[in-house]
């Protein structure tokens, strides 16, 4: 009898103890799950706002800026109006080495969160080689209006508005190329898919999928769970901007583009894998020419490639627009 009572009390104690452990585990599990959910939501919100409002780092024009009277390069301010009424700003560099007016014209489209004048050296080089150059501030950047950037969601249409502006300046002899860098490459692809007046594309450090680049960005700043967070950030940014930042993807647009295309990719690019660059180049109807630069990352391809790369780029542009 006493043995049975001992067993009964022991079983009761184990039940109470087990219940306490289970309650503790559930509490800890709930706390961890809540903390993880809070972290995912916080990073997703921060990342989404960073994508669409990176700061107007191309702005703050002042005395001596590149379009001021007498400034080096001879740039002058130009404007376009987007289909939604947004005012768009740029700088026009007329061809400097041509004895007669030339129709060869190129639009330069910067990347995400570029520092001021990131494309200025390219503009001055091309103008010196006999090209008319329009260096553009995308919406949400620099002197252009617009509250949100959208990685091509609206900028593809904006770029077509710029085509109208430069066509009015150059006239019917215009032979038009677009040089887009990173985000600018995605914008160039969106525009070229529906704009037959673009006859050549130069894509510097282009990506095949925006989500891959965002995941690489999160890894670079040591954010955990980049593969989980990147799609959430892109979806949230698209909802905030009111337009998709990622669809159609560059790799889905490329098969629609018949213009000759040159891709320049850095072999040490931590945002765009080598495989993505090769896949993107291969899906154009006329496979794109791919130049890979050893030792170059995502943002320094032109600098690492040096004068030889610039000569190859100009030779490609000259040939592609002379057809």
Image (cartoon, rainbow, N blue to C red):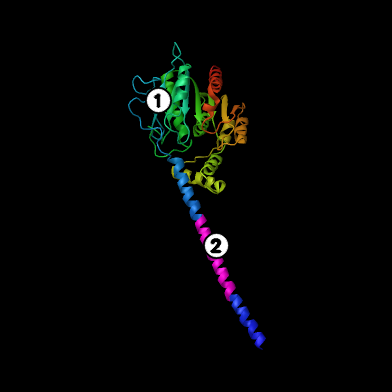
Which label is found at residue 91? 1
Quarter of the image containing the C terminus? Answer: top right
N-terminal of the two: label 2 or label 1?
A: 2
Neighbourhood count class around disc 1 (C-alpha, 10 Å): few under 14, some 14–19, many 20 upward: many
257 versus 125 height, above or below: below
Q: Is residue 298 left or right of residue 53?
A: right
User: Residue 158 placed where, x, y %?
Assistant: 44, 31
Residue 16 screen position, x and y as percent: 57, 75
Q: Residue at x 62, y 32 (%)?
A: 278
Main SS class of the magenta portion in the image:
helix
Give yes or no for contact between labels 2 and 1 (Cβ–Cβ under 8 Å).
no
Is 134 part of what is drawn in magenta? no
Judged from the image, the secondary structure of the residue bearing numbered disc 1 is: strand
Which residue occupies the foreground of this view, 84 or 294?
A: 294
* Helix, strand or loop for disc 2: helix
Q: CA distance from mark 2 to mark 1?
A: 57 Å
Asked whether, in this view, residue 69 is left or right of residue 127, the answer is left
Please state the extent of the stretch shown in magenta in the rendering. Answer: 16-36
The label number, if any, that marks residue 29 in the structure image: 2
Q: Quadrant of the N terminus?
A: bottom right
- Residue at image position (53%, 65%) is 27
Residue 264 image-quadrant placement? top right
Residue 314: tell me if it is visible: yes
| Disc ID at residue 199 | none
Tell me where residue 87 sits by quadrant: top left
């Amino acid at each position: 009898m006493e043995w049975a009572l001992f067993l009964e009390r022991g079983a009761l104690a184990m039940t109470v103890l087990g219940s306490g452990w289970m309650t503790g585990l559930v509490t800890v599990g709930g706390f961890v799950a809540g903390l993880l959910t809070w972290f995912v939501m916080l990073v997703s919100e921060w990342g989404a706002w960073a994508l669409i409002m990176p700061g107007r780092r191309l702005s703050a024009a002042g005395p001596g800026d590149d379009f001021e009277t007498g400034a080096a390069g001879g740039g002058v301010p130009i404007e376009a109006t987007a289909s939604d009424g947004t005012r768009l700003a740029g700088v026009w560099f007329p061809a400097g080495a041509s004895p007669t007016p030339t129709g060869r014209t190129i639009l330069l489209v910067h990347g995400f969160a570029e520092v001021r004048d990131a494309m200025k050296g390219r503009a001055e080089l091309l103008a010196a080689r006999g090209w008319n150059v329009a260096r553009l501030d995308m919406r949400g950047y620099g002197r252009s209006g617009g509250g949100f950037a959208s990685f091509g969601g609206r900028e593809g249409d904006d770029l077509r508005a710029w085509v109208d502006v430069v066509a009015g300046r150059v006239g019917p002899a215009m032979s038009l190329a677009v040089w887009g860098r990173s985000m600018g490459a995605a914008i160039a692809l969106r525009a070229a898919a529906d704009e037959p007046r673009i006859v050549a594309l130069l894509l510097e450090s282009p990506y095949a999928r925006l989500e891959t680049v965002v995941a690489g960005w999160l890894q670079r700043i040591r954010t955990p769970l980049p593969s989980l967070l990147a799609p959430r950030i892109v979806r949230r940014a698209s909802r905030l901007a009111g337009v998709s930042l990622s669809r159609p993807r560059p790799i889905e647009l490329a098969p629609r583009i018949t213009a000759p295309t040159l891709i320049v990719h850095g072999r040490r690019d931590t945002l765009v894998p080598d495989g993505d660059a090769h896949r993107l180049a291969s899906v154009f109807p006329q496979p794109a020419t791919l130049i890979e630069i050893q030792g170059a990352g995502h943002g320094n391809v032109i600098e690492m490639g040096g004068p030889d790369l610039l000569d190859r780029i100009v030779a490609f542009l000259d040939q592609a627009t002379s057809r």
